[in-house]
Amino acid sequence: MGFFGKLFSREKKQQLDSGLQKTKEGMWGKITRAVAGKSRIDDDVLDNLEEAFVTSDVGVDTTIKIIKRIEDRVARDKYVNSAELNRLLCEEIAAMLAENSIGDAGVSDFSVPPVANPGDPYVIMVVGVNGVGKTTTIGKLANQFKQAGAKVVLGAADTFRAAAVEQLDIWADRVGVPIVKQKMGSDPAAVAFDTLTHAKSVGADIVIIDTAGRLHNKVGLMNELTKIKNVMQRVVPDAPQEVLLVLDGSTGQNAFEQARQFVAATEVNQLAITKLDGTAKGGVVIGISDQFKIPVKYIGIGEGINDLQLFDREEFVKSLFSPEDLK
C-alpha cells in the first residue's frame, strides 16, 4: 500500500485535517515561501526552511535534524527539485517520528491494553499543570474507552484544588462512569488507593487517576507522585502502567519546558498534546516527540467529547500538506 497507504477512516481524517488547519496554514505557508521561485533545493532553500521550522515551534534541535535529513536525501538522490520538497519533508518527518517513538505500542484503537495479572485494571496516572486541558482529556479518554466497551473508573486525586474534583465529577457524570473522590485536602495517595480497590471490586478494565496540577518544585512533585505510585502498587503491583503527561500545544516552547520538568520528576511514558485546533503551533508535536523520545499517544483537536484521537504519525504529517503535494 506504500508508505502512506495505511487505512484511516474518512471521518477521523476530516476531523484531523480540520483540527490542524491553523498549523497547516502557518507552518506550511512559511515553507511555501521558503521555496518560492526556486527550481531546486539549494543552500538558500535550506536556510529558509530552517527559519520556517524554528518559528513554527518545532524547536532548534529538531529543526537541525530535519534539515540534515533533507540534505542527506538531496545528496543521495543527486537532484531534487523544489516541487518534490513537500513529499520529501512529509516522508522524512514521519520517518523521524517513527524512529523517535521508543516504546510506542502502535495501538490503533481504544481497546483495553494488556495487563500483567488477569483481573487487574489498566491504570493511567495523568500528570500536567493546571490549564493544559488535563481534566478534559481524562473525560474524553473515559468516553473513548467506554465507547470501546471498557468498564472505566475515575479517581479524583487532585485534592488541592476544589475545582479539579468538581470538574472531574462533571465529566464522570457526562460520560456515565463512576468516580472515587474525597474531600478537598485529602491525601492524594489515599484517593488513588481507594480508587484501585473499588475498581478491582467491580471488575473495572481502565482506571484513570487525576493528580495535582502543580509545579511547586521538582522534589515535592517527585515525592508526591512517587507516593501515589507506591500506594497504588499495593493493590495493582504494576500500576500505573501508563504515566500520561498532558501538554497544551498552543503554548509552543512553554510546553517543552513543562515536559522537561515532569520528565525529571516522574517516569512519564506517554504524552497527550491538547488544544491543537486553536493554534498554529502544532509543530510542537514534532519537536516534543523528537526531543524527549516519549511517544505522543493522544492529541486533542477540538472541544467536542470525541475530539481526542490516538496519534497517528503518518496521518498527522499528511494533514499538514495538501493532497496534491503528496502525489
Image: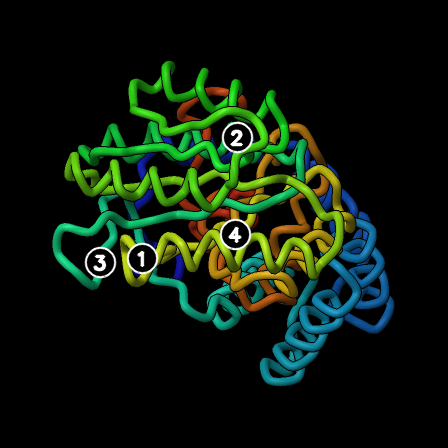
> How far apart, in angstroms, are the residues tagged by discs 3 and 2?
24 Å
Sequence-first tag of 3 and 2:
3
Mark 4 lies on a secondary structure that is strand
Sequence-first tag of 4 and 3:
3
Q: Is label 1 or label 2 in front?
A: 1
Q: Is residue 26 visible?
A: yes
Q: Nearer the viewer, residue 253 or 85?
A: 253
| Residue occupying image coordinates x 55% and y 35% | 158
> How far apart, in angstroms, are the residues tagged by discs 1 and 3?
16 Å
Query: In the rendered structure, which amino acid carries the disc numbered 2?
Result: Thr
Residue hosting label 3: 115
- Which quadrant of the view contains residue 178? top left
| Callout 4–callout 3 Cβ contact below 8 Å | no
Mark 1 lies on a secondary structure that is loop
Residue hosting label 2: 135
| Residue occupying image coordinates x 52% and y 52% | 271
Tag on residue 234?
1
Q: Nearer the viewer, residue 49 or 299?
A: 299
Sequence-first tag of 1 and 2:
2
> How far apart, in angstroms, are the residues tagged by discs 4 and 3?
20 Å
Tag on residue 271?
4
Q: Nearer the viewer, residue 33 or 284?
A: 284
* Disc 3 crowd, CA 10 A, few/some/many (<14, 14-19, 20+): some
Tag on residue 152?
none
Query: In the rendered structure, which amino acid carries the disc numbered 3?
Result: Val
Residue 142 image offset from top left, x and y in percent: 35, 31
